Image (cartoon, rainbow, N blue to C red):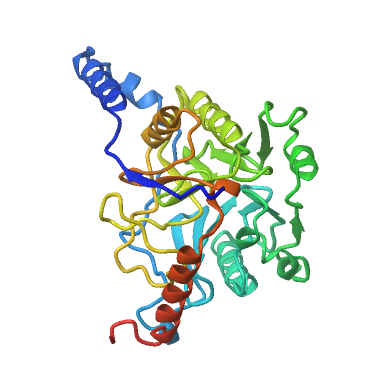
């Protein structure tokens, strides 16, 4: 039996909106705290900046670097792979501590990550008047568009940045972060004066993890939460993982939620088709903690039903046998890819 894929666009749920309104009203009516009390919750959070727009895959691929390198602050860098190399256009994150650096993911196909990574690390070393720093490459999950650069980095011989690559498996992940029981136990890694907390978040992928940087108060959510299509392969596990992130962040500052992709446009409820390499009007990368509650409300509203539901900043996108790729879907992908590739040297021309 064939089950048709149904995508429904809905506004934020009324209950969610009411809860948010009540929370804001309560905050507004609360008595003012002394200035020291207000600052104490966030005084230790190190700020940074995000660009107004990211490079994607154009308008002219001849002019586009393989990776865009953005300095969030002097010890956190965001690298975005160009759509001219692969339509997935993933983000990877490079965090520095006193004793070692941590790289979240290694990019997608044809990424050629080594030169951009070396450039960034060597410049950090120069700025900090250091000769070397060990680097550990970990993964938010095991899918190929985030692990394709593993072999390239394993083959890289650079005494200034000796690299260890942690395999994207449950056992290797548990061991590295000190997680005894998967997925219930949290873990952590200390980069030297910079502790990164780690939560297991299966549901999109069995080996999914979220990482919370105490220094910047950023929650890195991999492919579980980002502005785009949230592919859900195991609905119960995904829902439990989202609840785990909500519980973990309760009472903690959250500056941003940063995922691995942007697929959404700036127009609410509208995403770019799969296969798009040039996204001149894409959604901003950062989301707020509130999106976790909106995702949770959306999952609760589904009540286990197999529907794809579009929200303002993301789409819940269950996958599996009931959503086998249709001929129409494959045709859209092929048509999108062909049109984009035909114009990759100048997307401004018809």
| Of residues 118 and 286, the one drawn nearer to the viewer in this rendering | 286
Q: Quadrant of residue 57?
A: bottom left
224 w.r.t. 114: above or below: above
Where is residue 335 drawn, in percent x and y? 43, 75
Task: Name which residue lies at 35% across and 57% down.
Answer: 271
Task: Name which residue lies at 68% across and 44% down.
Answer: 207
Where is residue 235 drawn, in percent x and y? 56, 36
* Residue 268 visible in rendering: yes
Is 219 on the left or on the right of 58, as rendered?
right
Where is residue 82 drawn, in percent x and y? 48, 72
265 w.r.t. 40: above or below: below
Is 74 on the left or on the right of 234, as rendered?
left
Task: Name which residue lies at 50% across and 66% down.
Answer: 327
Task: Name which residue lies at 41% across and 83% down.
Answer: 344
| Of residues 195 and 342, the one drawn nearer to the viewer in this rendering | 342
Is 70 on the left or on the right of 193, as rendered?
left
329 w.r.t. 141: above or below: below
| Of residues 128 and 288, the one drawn nearer to the viewer in this rendering | 288
Where is residue 194 drawn, in percent x and y? 60, 40
120 w.r.t. 49: above or below: below
């Amino acid at each position: 039996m064939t089950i048709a894929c149904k995508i429904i666009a809905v506004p934020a749920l009324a209950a969610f909106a009411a809860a948010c309104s009540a929370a804001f009203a309560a905050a507004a009516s609360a008595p003012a705290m002394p200035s020291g009390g207000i600052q104490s919750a966030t005084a230790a959070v190190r700020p940074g900046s995000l660009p107004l727009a990211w490079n994607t895959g154009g308008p002219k691929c001849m002019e586009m670097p393989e990776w865009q390198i953005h300095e969030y602050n002097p010890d956190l860098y965001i690298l975005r792979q160009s759509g001219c190399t692969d339509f997935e256009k993933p983000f990877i994150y490079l965090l520095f501590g006193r004793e070692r650096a941590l790289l979240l993911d290694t990019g997608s196909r044809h990424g050629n990550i080594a030169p951009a990574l070396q450039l960034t690390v060597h410049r950090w070393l120069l700025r900090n008047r250091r000769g070397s720093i060990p680097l550990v490459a970990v993964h938010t999950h095991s899918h190929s568009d985030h692990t394709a650069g593993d072999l390239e980095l394993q083959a890289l011989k650079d005494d200034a940045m000796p690299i260890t690559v942690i395999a994207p498996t449950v056992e290797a992940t548990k061991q590295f972060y000190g997680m005894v029981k998967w997925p219930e136990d949290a873990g952590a890694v200390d980069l030297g004066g910079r502790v990164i907390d780690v939560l297991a978040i299966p549901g999109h992928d069995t080996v999914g993890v979220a990482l919370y940087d105490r220094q910047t108060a950023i929650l890195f959510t991999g492919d579980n939460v980002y502005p785009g299509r949230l592919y859900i392969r195991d609905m119960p596990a995904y829902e439990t993982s989202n609840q785990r992130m909500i519980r973990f962040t309760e009472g903690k500052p959250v500056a941003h939620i940063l995922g691995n992709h942007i697929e959404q446009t700036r127009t609410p409820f509208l995403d770019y088709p799969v296969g798009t390499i040039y996204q001149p009007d894409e959604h901003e990368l950062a989301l707020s903690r509130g999106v976790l509650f909106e995702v949770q409300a959306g999952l609760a509203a589904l009540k286990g039903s197999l529907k794809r539901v579009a929200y303002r900043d993301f789409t819940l996108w269950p996958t599996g046998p009931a959503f086998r790729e249709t001929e129409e879907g494959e045709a859209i992908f092929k048509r999108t890819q062909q049109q984009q590739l035909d114009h990759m040297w100048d997307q401004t021309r018809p």
